[in-house]
Image: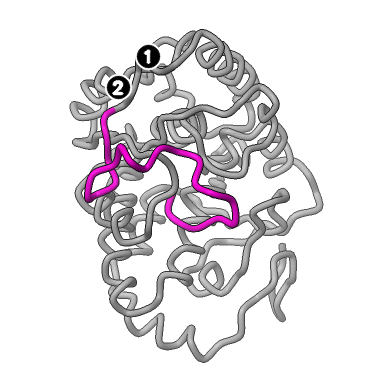
Amino acid sequence: MYGSSDRPPRGDYSRAGADYTCPQNYAAYTEADHATYRQLYARQAALLPGLACDEFIAALPSLGASDRIPRFEAVNERLMKATGWEIVTVPGLIPELPFFSLLANRKFPVTDWIRTPAELDYIVEPDVFHDLFGHVPMLFNPVLADYVQRYGQGGVKAHALGACEQLSRLYWYTIEFGLIRQPDGLRAYGAGILSSKGEMAFSVRDPSPLRLPLTLERAMRTRYKIDTYQQNYFVIDSFDQLFDLTAADFTALYQNLALLPEIQPGVLQAGERA
């Protein structure tokens, strides 16, 4: 959700307050917008069995009706009861420090505009479908919800230490493009996969990308692609494992990473097996 783009900002940032949040402008949605959301939801939901993790599939109905863009306050009634989180409206990508600060306070920023029909298969910036369908169901899982808050707290510190690039890779390879090994096989839990028509099957079943056990150093050294399917995925065995990995202070890790070269996506290091 945070970051920069070579394209002009797509949302209406004049609506945003000092923390970049704003009210959801529900009245602005057209019937065509709702139809786009309905089409995207139906298409992605049909792909979930055998590809999405059990926790995501179980939580998806908590978003509410699938035939219209949900009202955020209705989702929040259920989300707050489940894990103490709430979603807040933002006009689009926001700077890293406000993003981290919102997560640290259990507030997940959700873009409120939706892509055009011409962008059904690919969109450069996150829209309401990516944020709601891809991210929010996993916030109903208590362990993953605590991990996202811990990430936000760590992000505030990383910003002060000049280490946001390294930490952003951890976000990318877990919250956006993470895989988990279930008893019945590999499954996706990352929002970038779960909201993508093509990358769900690719990430879980295609033999070409590297799938490596998640370690902090390896993930934080590994660059990533924003305009193609990933060449690297990192795999966890449980959400508890993910939460425990982030218990330590990262200051020493950032210092070590500064001395190490970056790793290009899709490249195995000595001693690694995909």
What residue is rendered at 58% in x and 17% in y? 36
- Residue interval drawn in magenta: 1-23
What residue is rendered at 66% in x and 58% in y? 225
Amino acid carrying mark 2 in the image: Val
What residue is rendered at 73% in x and 41% in y? 202
Contact, CB < 8 Å: mark 1 with mark 2? yes
Based on the displayed image, in which of its 4 quarters is residue 111 positioned?
top left
Quick check: 97 above or below 149? below
Q: Position of residue 28 (x, y in %)?
A: 40, 18
The disc label shown at residue 75, or none: 2
Q: Position of residue 153 (x, y in %)?
A: 25, 61
Quick check: 15 above or below 73? below
Element marked by disc 2 = helix
Q: Position of residue 50 (x, y in %)?
A: 64, 28
Amino acid carrying mark 1 in the image: Gly
Lower sequence index among marks 1 and 2: 1
